[in-house]
Image: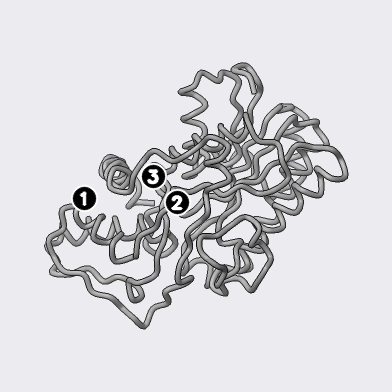
Amino acid sequence: MKLDSKIYVAGHRGLVGSAILRRLQRDGYTNLVYRTSAELDLRDKGAVDHFFAEEKPEFVFLAAAKVGGIVANNEFPADFIRDNLMIQTNVIDASYRNNVTKLLFLGSTCIYPKLAPQPLKEEYLLTGPLEPTNDAYALAKISGIKMCQSYNKQYGTTYISAMPTNLYGENDNFDLQSSHVLPALMRKFHEAKEENKASVEIWGTGTPKREFLYSDDLADACLFLMQHYNDDEIVNIGVGEDVTIRELAETIKDVVGFEGELTFDTSKPDGTPRKLVDTSKINGLGWSANVDLQDGVQRAYNWYLENMNVLNKA
């Protein structure tokens, strides 16, 4: 991938895609292609085919997806499986038919079985039942992985798949109904501080453990893999350590400056008990994360403060 290679970033306004686009621009890549969802609906096969035939990208970062937290995944499983299957099928197939040199498909660590051994190794894929609250999304992502592998096998393409752990950072979703746990807590703590509330309620018991990767670290890993990895097998991207939801809440509380108490609604679901990825594969290739949780939460909160007026109106 050269500085003047034509590169398409699908999903460039989302958490992942925007981080990849920022990194490409920072590194001096000059021939970048992207479209908003209003300009190009990736669920529309005809529109995607026309775009690829017209633009002829050489490299594709497939970061476009319908994503959400436990609530959204649990309440709208049909939307998650349908939209994600359509998006990735259209983009992967159009890439093949328009001779894309290389494609990177972004999956998720929710592809792994709910009770798989920890840390999660790449070979644990399809070895047990999925977490029920987001199995529709997970199955769509597993299909994307298998589609990339199948095209490689049948057509000789070079389509690779990366599985990032829980992500956060600039351009995250802070909507309390559809966001993931970290941005949701950040907004809750900020609003509680502004309203001088005595406490903030957190879903579940606070005991599940999660790993959090800053979006700029993910972008760095994606460019690394695009340059250095060509194999069929999936690659985990993570930091290699996790924290409990209670510890996460304490970190966010500290960064935001909220001085009240934490309460836990144990009637709400915890989700998967633990989800830590084994990063030995990508570490062995020569990549590791750089942004620790405290620093990353501070960066994310700074961005939220700068953009919250627009975010809260959305």
Between discs 1 and 2, the one toward the N terminus = 2
Disc number for residue 303: none
Residue indicated by mark 3:
169
**Horizontal and vertical percent for residue 43?**
68, 50
Name the residue located 88 percent from the left edge and 45 percent from the top edge: 154
Q: Nearer the viewer, residue 141 or 158?
A: 158
Name the residue located 19 percent from the left edge and 62 percent from the top edge: 192
Name the residue located 36 percent from the left edge and 83 percent from the top edge: 267
**Horizontal and vertical percent for residue 10?**
61, 39
The answer to whether residue 309 is visible is no
- Measured along the vertical axis of the image, is residue 223 above or below residue 41? above
Residue indicated by mark 1:
255
User: Left of 87 or right of it: where is 244?
Assistant: left
Name the residue located 56 percent from the left edge and 39 percent from the top edge: 36
The image quadrant of residue 194 is bottom left
**Horizontal and vertical percent for residue 91?**
71, 43
Q: Nearer the viewer, residue 169 or 111?
A: 111
